[in-house]
Image (spheres, helix red, strand yellow):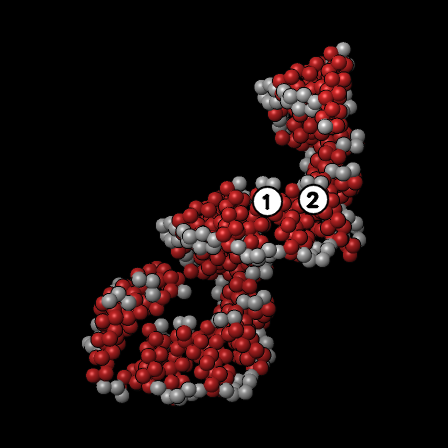
């Protein structure tokens, strides 16, 4: 009640003095009407009193009148009039007017855009102690707008603005300390995470949304303070509930991964949805990911595609990659390799190392573009230099085989090492191969074994097969046939045809397991269907000792399974026709059953169909179709 009484008295006093011609009080009265202080809010009356004050020469009134014209408060919006009144206020020495005039020149509001004039007026405002002017001046020095870029001057003005209590300046100062921008010439002392944290805290407590977000990041990553995921969550929650789309996305991440709170995928989805609908490109990407994988909502590939598209069109490089994948595989949209290529290109040109890797694959395989191994190599190189472990592995492969560049075993080894150390299971397996064969390094079977083990534990089927070989033959470790069998089994069950062949050998010869010729036959068959020549030979030898009656039983079993729509049975039946197992050899029938299996989504059938197109088995040779089916099977 006391505050209301005070506001009413303040209003009445301003009214009396304003009506008596006091131009300062006319401005104050306008402010009362604009904000409903001591009276009913009335923007039209606010405008009229600002006009009186401005026409009487009051620079505050002139600035506030400019704001009314700029934003259509109590009058029709008129940017040219806004500019003219800001100019009057600025020339009268009003620092708010000078700052607003600078913004007019900066954004081209009511006048021609002129960054040099914007800089000059921000400078005047800043020198007059206006913290908003100081903040805008910092922005000019930081980005070289209307003046030469000067990070040290930017830092000094951020400091002035921050110390005067401007929460945007406090955020920017924290950013400078975190990233070592303009803070000191001593390179070792550029970065000061503790000061970064303190200024982000001040900015956050002052209500600055970017400060609140960065404070959350500080708590999340332990930057300048003790890591505290619960505090990070609370700041993201505050930010999100205030309608900030960045905070909403980060809150979604917290709920999705159980960071500082209980994991809740439905809440994660809802916050991503809010962020996405608010126009946040990262939120749109995450929402697309939710729809693609059914996280917190029903799986919906068409919606996933649409949100990836929004994210990609907004410039999000991760969204561009996933949109490319949608076009490549026909996820939620019609398959279109050229569009896939174009989106990978956008992501790659934007500096995304994953996009660069995928673009390299397009050039390497001729997906949506002409095959070009030199361009593939160059994009793999960019991706690898950007720290992408997949790009590093593929770059190593290029150097190993002289693809798009000169063969270089030492560079092969170095890039496989980087990829392996980055946790890439393919890189770990290939590094194991380098140590095993002495490629670009000294031969070392123990190191080969260790890297095969890492790769195998990362569920890499080649690594699992090679680890099995190490245990079987005692390479870099103690011989252990049971472990060999176990790792071959893992590799085989994941579809690796070398693992399947070696598992077949284990069953055939009783290595690490009980001898079982029927299981040996089944695994040789799986391996042979995947294109393993050794398995095909073993299968041929095996068939010589089997009775025709047994082969016919196998054929009938596969035929029944295939006719019932089982894609695995269709693939196996195709193989029987291919090799003449239990029937007359018939490449055309093999091809037809492979088509059924492949179109039903069976990766083995897709691989077998690709072989048919590649070698012209039962159909016309067609390398483009072969590549497409090889890609589907992978």
- Residue 116: x and y in percent read 69, 31
Q: Is residue 23 left or right of residue 391?
A: right
Dot label at residue 226: none
Please state, as top left, top right, bottom left or bottom right, where the N terminus lies in the image. Answer: top right
Which residue is rendered at x = 22% and y = 71% of the image? 560
Quadrant of residue 134 in the image? top right
- Work out whether residue 255 or residue 533 is closer to the camera in this orientation and state it: 255
Q: Secondary structure at mark 1?
A: helix
Toward the front, the furthest residue is 1
Which residue is rendered at x = 42% and y = 53% of the image? 299
Q: Is residue 586 left or right of residue 148?
A: left
Dot label at residue 204: 2
- Residue 376: x and y in percent read 49, 59
Crowding near the residue tagged with mark 2, few <14, some 14–19, many ≥20 C-alpha atoms within 10 Å: many
User: Disc 2 versus disc 1: distance between alpha carbons?
Assistant: 13 Å
Q: Is residue 120 left or right of residue 73?
A: right
Q: Secondary structure at mark 2?
A: helix
Q: Is residue 579 left or right of residue 367?
A: left
Quadrant of residue 135 in the image? top right
Q: How many marks?
A: 2
Q: Earlier in the sequence, mark 2 or mark 1?
A: 2
Dot label at residue 240: 1
Whether residue 37 is visible? yes
């Amino acid at each position: 009640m006391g505050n209301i009484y005070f506001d009413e008295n303040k209003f009445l006093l301003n009214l009396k003095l304003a009506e008596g011609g006091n131009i300062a009080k006319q401005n104050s009265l306008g402010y009362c009407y604009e904000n409903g202080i001591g009276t009913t809010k009335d923007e039209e009356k606010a405008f009229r009193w600002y006009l009186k004050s401005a026409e009487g020469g009051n620079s505050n009134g002139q600035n506030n009148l400019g704001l009314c014209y700029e934003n259509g408060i109590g009058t029709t919006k008129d940017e040219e009039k806004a500019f003219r009144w800001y100019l009057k206020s600025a020339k009268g020495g009003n620092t708010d007017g000078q700052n607003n005039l600078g913004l007019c020149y900066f954004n081209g509001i009511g006048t021609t855009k002129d960054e040099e004039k914007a800089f000059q007026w921000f400078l005047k405002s800043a020198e007059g102690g206006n913290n908003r002017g100081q903040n805008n001046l910092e922005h000019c020095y930081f980005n070289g707008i209307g003046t030469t870029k000067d990070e040290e001057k930017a830092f000094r003005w951020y400091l002035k603005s921050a110390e005067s209590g401007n929460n945007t300046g406090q955020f920017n100062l924290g950013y400078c300390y975190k990233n070592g921008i303009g803070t000191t010439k001593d390179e070792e002392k550029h970065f000061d995470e503790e000061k970064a944290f303190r200024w982000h805290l001040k900015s956050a407590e002052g209500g600055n949304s970017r400060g609140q977000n960065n404070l959350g990041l500080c708590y999340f990553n332990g930057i300048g303070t003790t890591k505290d995921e619960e505090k990070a969550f609370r700041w993201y929650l505050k930010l999100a509930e205030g309608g900030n789309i960045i905070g909403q996305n980060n809150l979604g991440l917290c709920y999705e991964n159980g960071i500082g709170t209980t994991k809740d995928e439905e809440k994660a989805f809802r916050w991503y949805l809010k962020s996405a609908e608010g126009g946040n490109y990262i939120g749109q990407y995450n929402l697309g990911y939710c729809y693609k994988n059914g996280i917190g909502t029903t799986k919906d590939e068409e919606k996933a595609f649409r949100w990836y598209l929004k994210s990609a069109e907004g410039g999000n490089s991760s969204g561009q990659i996933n949109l490319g994948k949608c076009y490549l595989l026909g996820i939620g949209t019609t398959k279109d390799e050229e569009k896939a290529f174009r989106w990978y290109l956008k992501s790659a040109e934007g500096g995304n190392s994953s996009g660069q890797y995928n673009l390299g694959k397009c050039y390497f395989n001729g997906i949506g573009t002409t095959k070009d191994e030199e361009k593939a190599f160059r994009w793999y190189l960019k991706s690898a230099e950007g720290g992408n472990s997949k790009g590093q592995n593929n770059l190593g492969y290029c150097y190993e085989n002289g693809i798009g560049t000169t063969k270089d075993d030492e560079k092969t080894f170095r890039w496989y090492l980087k990829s392996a150390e980055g946790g890439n299971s393919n890189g770990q397996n290939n590094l194991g191969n380098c140590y095993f064969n002495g490629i670009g390094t000294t031969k070392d079977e123990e190191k080969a074994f260790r890297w095969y083990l890492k790769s195998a534990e990362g569920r890499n089927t080649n690594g699992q097969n090679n680890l099995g070989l190490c245990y079987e033959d005692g390479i870099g470790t103690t011989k252990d046939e049971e472990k060999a069998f176990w790792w071959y089994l893992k590799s085989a069950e994941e579809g690796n045809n070398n693992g399947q062949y070696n598992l077949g050998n284990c069953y055939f010869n009783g290595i690490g397991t009980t001898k079982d010729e029927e299981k040996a036959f089944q695994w040789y068959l799986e391996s042979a269907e995947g294109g393993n020549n050794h398995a095909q030979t073993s299968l041929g030898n095996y068939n010589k000792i089997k009775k025709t009656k047994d082969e016919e039983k196998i054929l009938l079993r596969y035929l029944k399974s295939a006719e019932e729509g089982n894609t695995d049975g269709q693939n196996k039946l195709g193989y029987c026709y291919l090799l003449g197992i239990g029937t007359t050899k018939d490449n055309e029938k093999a091809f037809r059953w492979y088509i059924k299996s492949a179109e039903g989504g069976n990766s083995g059938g897709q691989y077998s169909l690709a072989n048919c197109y590649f070698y012209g088995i039962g159909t016309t040779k067609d390398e483009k179709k072969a590549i497409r089916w090889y890609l589907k099977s992978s």
